[in-house]
Image (tube, grey):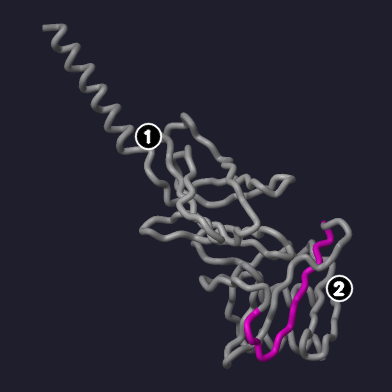
Amino acid sequence: MKKVILTMVIIMIITILAMVFLLTGKVRTDVYLEDFSISQDGKTMILNVEVSSSGGYIRKIKQVSEGSNRYYTFYSTFGINSKIGAKKNFEIEIDQNMEQIYFYTGAKDYKLVLIKDYIEGWKKINYTSKGTYKLELPKVDDIEYIGINTGAQDNNYFKYEDHDTIQKIYNIFVDLETTLDSLTFNPEDPEELYDIGFSDKNIENPSINTIISVYHKQGKYYAEQRYNGIYEISEEDFNVIRNYTE
């Protein structure tokens, strides 16, 4: 009798373990890109990823497409909240034809996480915790100066270093969010355009390293950060920028 009971217990344990493994190790839809790096030869990229939920770990990445746009799916570790086989860094192959990298988010949908700018190289798409785009800005106290270029208007350039002007212009952009992505280097067909550059004093050999295009088009006003997002702004804020070029 004892042997029968022991056998039944063993079978139950094995069954439970099998079910745990079958029900775990599945696709994760909450993976986001923390950071990335490119190898010296430019042939591989390291993706440093995290999960947004409070539990679980990643063990595997799978490429599910070819061509210029690459789509990737991640899988969780086996076991409930198990760290066995967990990884945060994944190496992928890249080539000159790749332009965009997407992560799977569930329901046959993918989120753009990296885009290739042929001038500046690979750029990470900046999202908020709500999944919307957020402008990439230096901290206001780190801004050495702000430059405004009127571009096609006259090709004039205006530079501002005083704190009050920097703060006033900075406040236009700091809290903007959008779901509309920017997939071009420059805005398409603006009627009037100003490029706003923010110089970060912490960068060696300071130069304009954050650029936002402000423009109006078809009766609406926008701030656009290349390969990030297109944000709607008020006519009043647009006129603030315009006034600094007069």
Q: Is residue 162 left or right of residue 222?
A: right
Residue at position x 67%, y 73% from top?
Answer: 185
What is the magenta range? Answer: 187-202
* Residue 68 located within the stretch drawn in magenta: no
| Label ID, residue 161 | 2
Closest to the observer, 238 or 230: 230
Q: Earlier in the sequence, mark 2 or mark 1?
A: 1
Residue type, label 2: Glu
Residue at position x 35%, y 38% from top?
Answer: 24
Q: Is residue 81 left or right of residue 49?
A: left
Residue at position x 74%, y 67% from top?
Answer: 210
The span from disc 2 to disc 1 (Cα, nearest Å) is 55 Å
Residue at position x 42%, y 47% from top?
Answer: 28
Q: Position of residue 180 (x, y in %)?
A: 53, 73
Circle 2: element type: loop
Classify 91 as above or below 104. Answer: above
- Answer with the quarter of the image where residue 207 lies: bottom right
* Residue 198 located within the stretch drawn in magenta: yes
- Label 2, residues with CA under 10 Å away: few <14, some 14-19, many ≥20: few
Contact, CB < 8 Å: mark 2 with mark 1? no
Q: Is residue 204 left or right of residue 210?
A: right
| Residue reaching furthest to the top | 2
Q: Position of residue 11 (x, y in %)?
A: 21, 20
Residue 125 seen in the figure? no
Circle 1: element type: loop
User: Which residue, given by chain and number where applicable, does mark 1 sit on?
Assistant: 80
